[in-house]
Amino acid sequence: MFCGEPGRGSEQSICTECFADLPWNEAPVSPTPGIFEASIAMLHYSFPIDVAIKALKFRRKLFFVPAFTEILCAAQPLLPPDIDAVMPVPLHWRRKAMRGFNQAAEFAGPIAKLLGVPVVRNVRRKKATPFQSGLDAAERARNLRSAFVSTRPDPHAHVLIIDDVVTTGATARALAKRLLSCGVTKVSVLAVARAG
Ligand SMILES: [Zn+2]
């Protein structure tokens, strides 16, 4: 995947050396999960993941999707055992139309399958969130406060949010607040990488 060598088997797309060389987070489970039951980021946002995520999102390099889902699936032993649904961070329809896909939704399907739970999508993004880079935490939170709307009550007890890169965590927190306000009891978050 990253070096051109074949993966380790039919289920794997990253070769053994590249998998071992990934910038693994030495403490993937955050000790201060805040609003979340568990907050997990598998990698540091550095080479080659930063390049691969940008290629996926901005140049539609969908062949990276199996590598990212493989990295996320490696989190299974770290996840709380009572997760009963998976939710990708929704993209606003306009951004999704421009990009052609929602990368988090691409990752969510295989994770849900691994856990044996459904993917839920009863929350949508109300407005296209302005570019978040360069904003401080308070500005991001203000930006996101009303960004997510639920389309119906959620009957699930513990929803796992799937994201690509967590920076301040404000997006996932805003989504978690929305889920907790529509009937969900616990929310956890799993991301490919943590930046900063
Ligand atoms: Zn390799």
Image (spheres, rainbow, N blue to C red):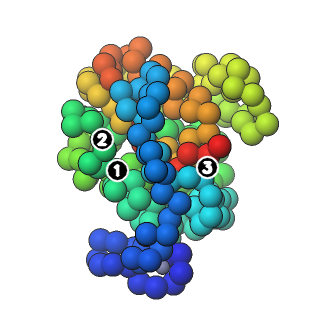
Q: Quadrant of residue 167?
A: top right
Left or right, 183 with reference to 62: left
Q: Look at 44% across and 45% down and name the residue there.
A: 27
- Is 52 placed above or below 85 here? below
Question: Within 8 Å: ligand 1 and the Cβ of disc 3?
Answer: no
Q: Look at 46% across and 50% down and name the residue there.
A: 26
Q: Is tag 1's residue or tag 3's residue first in the polypeptide sequence? A: 1
Mark linked to residue 75:
1
Residue at the bottom extreme of this rendering: 5
Which callout, 3 or 2, points to the residue nearer the camera? 2
- Is 78 placed above or below 3 here? above
Q: Which residue is mark 3?
A: 97
Q: Which residue is mark 2?
A: 79
Q: Quadrant of residue 92?
A: top right
Alpha carbon distance from label 3 to label 2: 32 Å
Q: Is tag 3's residue or tag 2's residue first in the polypeptide sequence? A: 2
Tell me whether circle 1 and circle 2 mark residues in contact (CB < 8 Å): yes
Residue 80 on image: x %, y %? 27, 36
Q: At numbered mark 3, what does the secondary structure look like: helix, strand or loop?
A: helix
Badge 2: residue crowd in 10 Å (few <14, some 14–19, many ≥20): some
Q: Look at 60% across and 53% down and name the residue there.
A: 45
Q: Amino acid at mark 1?
A: Ala
Q: At numbered mark 1, what does the secondary structure look like: helix, strand or loop?
A: loop
Residue at the right extreme of this rendering: 134
Q: Look at 41% across and 84% down and name the residue there.
A: 6
In depth, the one of 37 and 106 nearer the eye is 37
**Is residue 96 visible to the viewer in this orientation of the structure?**
yes
